[in-house]
Amino acid sequence: MTPIEVMAGSLAQSHKMLKDHIADFSDADMLTRPTPAANHTAWQLGHLILAEAGMVNACAPGAVPPPPAGFSDKFTKETAKNDDPKAFVGKSELLAVFDRNRTATIAWAKTLTPADFEKPGPEKMREFIPTVGHLVALLPVHDAMHLGQIQVIRRKLGRPLIF
């Protein structure tokens, strides 16, 4: 197995894990906060979608499709505090955009060569993404960080633990 195949597999695995963790969430569950200052799952998933698209497209413009109209405005630092269900899109739309974007990211990752992994990361993000390889490695880690937060929400909702 090549490093590219490992990274593409890791992207697919973290995608599946995140979807498994919220499979039994309703739209209302998606807005549950474990504590008042913590982000709810809907916002976290929107953030993951936009962050991934932004980082990948900074390395490979157009690799990930743009978000639907108005989508970006729903997932800002300011909207993270909002609990109004009308301010966000529902779980099914979030998952559709997440699936579409992750599929595009995996397809892009599979086109990379070992030499591409050494190319500089996006200039404005180079402090934490020094190379394209670092970016590909970061995306599943970013998912995992949010999965930990979603595990806490699962506990609050009394849902069975996953893993």
Image (cartoon, rainbow, N blue to C red):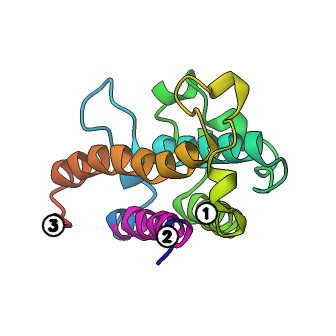
Secondary-structure class at tag 3 = loop
Q: Along the line of sight, which residue is nearer the eye, 73 or 49?
A: 49
Whether 10 is among the magenta residues is: yes
Q: Is disc 1 placed on a helix, strand or loop?
A: helix
Q: Earlier in the sequence, mark 3 or mark 1?
A: 1
Q: Write down the region rendered in magenta.
A: 4-20
Compared with 128, 146 (above or below) is: below
Residue 39, how many percent across, how many down? 39, 34
Q: Residues under labels 1 and 2: Cα distance?
A: 8 Å
Between discs 2 and 3, the one toward the N terminus: 2
Q: Residue furthest bottom?
A: 1
Q: Nearer the viewer, mark 3 or mark 1?
A: 1
Q: Is residue 25 left or right of residue 87?
A: left
Number of other residues with Cα within 10 Å of mark 2, as a class: few under 14, some 14 to 19, many 20 or more: some
Q: Of marks 1 and 2, which one's residue comes earlier in the chain?
A: 2
C-alpha separation, residue under disc 3 versus residue under disc 1 = 26 Å
At label 1, the amino acid type is Arg
Q: Kindly identify the amino acid type of the residue bearing the numbered disc 3.
A: Pro
Which residue is tagged 1?
102
Q: Main secondary structure of the magenta part?
A: helix
Using the rendered view, name the quadrant where residue 14 is placed: bottom left
Dot 2: element: helix
Q: Residue at x 62, y 26 (%)?
A: 126
Do the CB atoms of the residues marked 1 and 2 lie less than 8 Å apart?
A: yes
Q: Which residue is mark 3?
A: 160
Instruction: Give the amino acid type for the residue marked by disc 2 in the picture.
Output: Ala
Quadrant of residue 118 within the rendered picture: top right
Q: Which residue is mark 2?
A: 12
Q: x%, y% of residue 99?
A: 60, 67
Q: Please say if 103 is above or below 58.
A: below
| Residue name at image x 59 percent, y 57 percent | 94
Q: Nearer the viewer, residue 87 or 68?
A: 68
